[in-house]
Image (tube, rainbow, N blue to C red):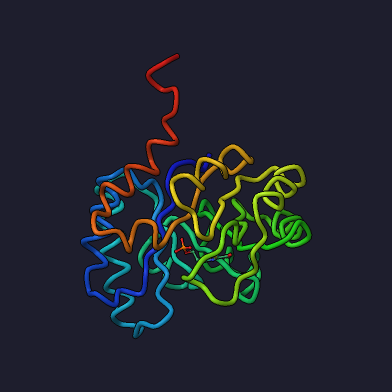
Amino acid sequence: MLSGLYLITDENRDGRLAQKVEAALKGGAAIVQYRAKEVRPDDRHKMAQKLRDLCTEYGAKLIINDLPELARDINADGVHLGQDDMPAVQARQILGGGKIIGISTHSVEEALKAEAQGADYIAIGSIFPTGTKDDTTLVGLDMLRNVRKAVRVPLVAIGGITPEGAFEALEAGADSVAVISGVMADSDPARAAKEYSLLFNRGKDNP
Ligand code: 3NM
């Protein structure tokens, strides 16, 4: 079952990516996606390896964006694919069995297709306006509710998710929330990650 804060890395313009990810892991991030669109392959490999070690240390899962070969080479837990990336079946051949494949979707149709292709989880976005990704569509919480009714696989809400928005997304049927700026752009990523992570422990101490 996919649950907890799903942290996605930023483009490391401040050179503090690994420190910020470690802080977020201390704050309770359960899943980390390494998303590096602008990085040279050898630097990307080194950072992916570093994040692999950190995620192992903190008991979190590591997902690699777009690149099944890199995911395989560093023994990541899985890969995340966009609508324009290779089909899930091809990614699974590269990754081998027992790995997680997530797919980005922006409509009920795309979600149904991703589920039929064997996605282990589906990301749905953008739930709220985001300044982080230009080429996404604002779909809103209603779309999340519609996708929740249409598919059975775990759902990750993405796009402009603040802690308040995370609460609403979980109420609307998301299993997890994916966040870039809400954690990576915060001056205290550990505190920010904890704020999101606490939402997943609601009621834990009050059976
Ligand atoms: N994918 P932030 S929105 C990477 O809608 C990404 O599929 C999206 O960043 C989608 O948490 C998005 O800073 C950006 O809004 C998420």
Residue 172 horizontal side relative to residue 17, left or right:
right
The residue sitting at 41% across, 30% down in the picture is 201
Rendered view: 35 above or below 78: below
Q: Position of residue 108 (x, y in %)?
A: 76, 56
Q: Farthest residue in the top direction? A: 207
Q: How many discs mark residues in the rendered view?
A: 0
Rendered view: 122 above or below 35: above
Residue 107 horizontal side relative to residue 157, left or right:
right
Can you say which quadrant of the picture contains the C terminus? top left
Task: Name the one closer to the observer, 81 or 180.
Answer: 180
Q: Farthest residue in the bottom direction? A: 40
Q: Position of residue 41 (x, y in %)?
A: 36, 83
Residue 24 horizontal side relative to residue 168, left or right:
left
Rendered view: 42 above or below 170: below
Task: Name the one closer to the observer, 203 or 92.
Answer: 203
Q: Position of residue 90 (x, y in %)?
A: 62, 70
Task: Name the one closer to the observer, 189 or 98.
Answer: 189
The residue sitting at 48% across, 41% down in the picture is 3
Q: Position of residue 22 (x, y in %)?
A: 24, 55
The residue sitting at 75% across, 42% down in the picture is 149
Which image quarter: residue 27? top left
